[in-house]
Amino acid sequence: MALATAGALLGAATLVLDLGNRLFGSYRRTVAGFTWRLGAVLGSVGLLLAPAGALALEPGSTVWRVLSGAAGVVGAVAFVHFLLPYRWGIRRVRRDGVQESCRELTPGILLREVSLRIPSLPAGLDGLEVLVISDVHCRSRRKLGLLRECCAALRPRGADLVLLLGDFGGKSELLAETIELLAAIPARLGTFCVLGNHDLEGAREATIRDLLGRHAVHVLPNAWARFPDRGLALVGLETPWRQPPPAPCEARLFAVGLAHTPDNLALLERLNVGLAVAGHTHGGRARLPVVGPVLVPTLYGRFLDRGLFRRGRTLLYVSAGLGYFCPSPRNRGELTRLVLRRAEGAPA
């Protein structure tokens, strides 16, 4: 029974981590929702630890043996589910015409350049460059200085589109300078933005929207922006915090989606989005060899940490973002430049 007990304890630990990820990933701060999820965690852990209580009352009894066996099986299932979370039709893209390189912009912050070959990309968008900046979290003058260095390095080349995915920072006195730096990066088709969960907390939302408007940054709160002459459309999602989502895009336009959280992937697919970008995960936390990240705040469990994913015809790039500017080899911030290429042999 020692093996069953170990399985139960391991299952309880991974169950807490997995449901904790999903709890933080939901960000639905209602009393009922929080109570239900907390009850699910505590109830599941209680079931897994029940054999310990039964042992104290009736050591070696039939009840204890049955509970131990059941807890061992449930614990093993919870552990396997934690290692291999259900993907809801999502798969990680590792090759399929993807080329990636990276260089250090400033200590602790990388610029990733990812070239994607997309069969559905219109010929007029071949070579489109999209700069993705997420989870800035600028909370100090030191971090503002690092951000200034990054933006200075990006300005000479600029991009066709600059997409800001929210969470600008928790210090209201730094917001003006933070947004000014980001808005100054040249964007030939414009700079577009969605707000993150931290931007919608407290009284920051109105201030941030006002600052973005002053600097000609187009905020897309569950709305579309269209470039019919280029065959391009952009949609921004601020769900689950903002409802309802917009209607799907017309098929003649190639749609690019912005979302703060990758939990919107299924919704982006329903909106006929060809390429989407998201942040929020910070690339996952507490990475372990082979296992990968332990903490990833998404409703899909640990799977959507960072990188390229596909669900149906929708590609999703999840950026680790600038995060909290932790200059360590295992946890570095990132900016991403996506270069879109039309796949060879794609129909006109």
Image (cartoon, rainbow, N blue to C red):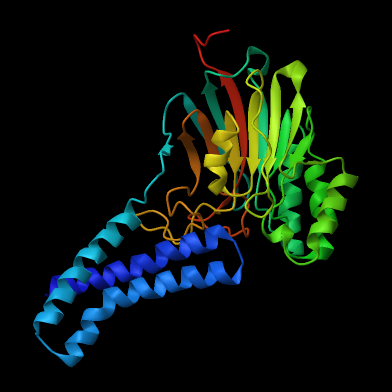
Residue in the picture at 24% in, 86% down: 53
Residue 318 location in percent, x, y?
A: 54, 43
For the point 80% across and 50% down, which residue is it? Answer: 179
The answer to whether any part of residue 34 appears in the image is yes
**Left or right: 167 in relation to 330:** right
Q: Position of residue 26 (x, y in %)?
A: 55, 58
Name the residue located 84 percent from the left edge and 64 percent from the top edge. 173
Q: Is 60 situated above or below 206?
A: below
- Towards the viewer: 60 or 286: 60
Give the answer, above or below, for where 274 lies relative to 278.
Answer: above
Q: Quadrant of the N terminus?
A: bottom left
Task: List the single residue furthest toward the bottom.
Answer: 57
- Name the side, left or right, on which 10 lies relative to 86: left
Q: How many marks?
A: 0
Residue at (61, 66) in percent of width and height:
29
Q: Quadrant of residue 78?
A: bottom left
Res 318 visible: no
Residue 121, given in percent of the width and then of the height, sits at 59, 19
Give percent across and percent down for residue 343: 52, 16
Where is the C terminus found, in terms of image quarters?
Answer: top right
Residue at the right extreme of this rendering: 214
Horizontal side of residue 168 vs 257, given as left or right? right
In this view, the residue in front, 296 or 159, is: 296
Q: Is residue 163 above or below residue 209?
A: above
Q: Quadrant of residue 61?
A: bottom left
